[in-house]
Image (tube, grey):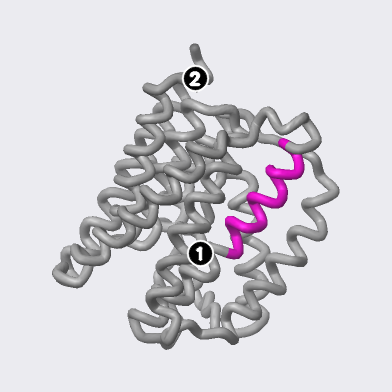
Amino acid sequence: MSILIAAAILIATLATAFLSSIFGMLGGLILMGILASILPIASAMVLHGLIQLTSNGYRAWLNRKDIDWSIVASLFVGNVAAMAVLVFIAFTPDRITVLLALGLLPYIAWALPKNLALDVSKKPIGIFAGAIVVTTNLLAGVGGPILDVFFQRVQLTRHQVVATKAVAQALGHISKVIFYGGLAAAAGQQDWPESWLLLAAIIASVVGTTLGKRVLDKMQDATFFSWTQRIMLSVGAVLIARALYLLTA
């Protein structure tokens, strides 16, 4: 791996961790789009999973007192159920599929009715959400935009939502690392990220998350929701355009 590519990955990790710490999920979507554009898909999935596991795990730790463990338990059951099926399907989506799925996710989440009764605190819905998020993580590398739909009707405080979503996303990334890590190991480990790059990326993720929280504490709710939607749809459009370009190239 060239120094230029490594530097680009570290800068992207720092910037997207910063963004994710402010908006909750945008950083992971953008980082996956960048990694999928410059690395083999299996390698991008593993590296993204480990970086996001660190970022979400750290965010969950900072808000650990606000985690709703009953919701986490339901999501975990769904995670395991989905993995039990998907583990028997050895697949690695191609670059165009990943970019197109990443680009469409924000629009799918945005288009769903706001009054859709998908309350993740209800056990059956929580299990369903866990299965959907893991499946989306394995297909596109990111499940945050879909996960957010299941938290629209939940009766939780803002801090509880942030903390519980962080744990849920961490579980999804663990599943992704296990799945694609196993594929990489079976292929001779050539798709595993280099140790020094992984360590540097994890450090960059922690730094970005810490800095982003300072901005979040000063931001107004109206600004938060306004910019979240704008950035999500803009990034989605760019990723769709990139996928279509590769499709016609």
Q: Amino acid at mark 1?
A: Leu
Q: In the image, is residue 193 above or below residue 83? A: above
Q: In the image, is residue 67 above or below residue 109? A: below
- Residue 183 lies within the magenta run: yes
Residue 195, image x and y in percent?
Answer: 56, 39
Q: Quadrant of residue 145?
A: bottom left
**Tag shown at residue 213:** none
> Going 40% across and 58% down the picture, which residue do you hit?
25
> Going 43% across and 44% down the picture, which residue do you hit?
201
Give the magenta part as a residue range. Answer: 171-184
Residue 170, image x and y in percent?
Answer: 54, 63
Per the image, label 1 sits on a secondary structure element best described as: helix
Per the image, label 2 sits on a secondary structure element best described as: helix
- Residue at the spot of label 2: 246
> Going 37% across and 22% down the picture, which residue do you hit?
4
- Residue at the spot of label 1: 147
Residue 163, image x and y in percent?
Answer: 43, 75
- Label 2, label 1: how many angstroms apart (C-alpha)? 28 Å
Nearer-the-camera pick, 190 or 172: 190
Q: How crowded is the residue under tag 1: few (<14 C-alpha within 10 Å), some, or many (20+)?
A: many
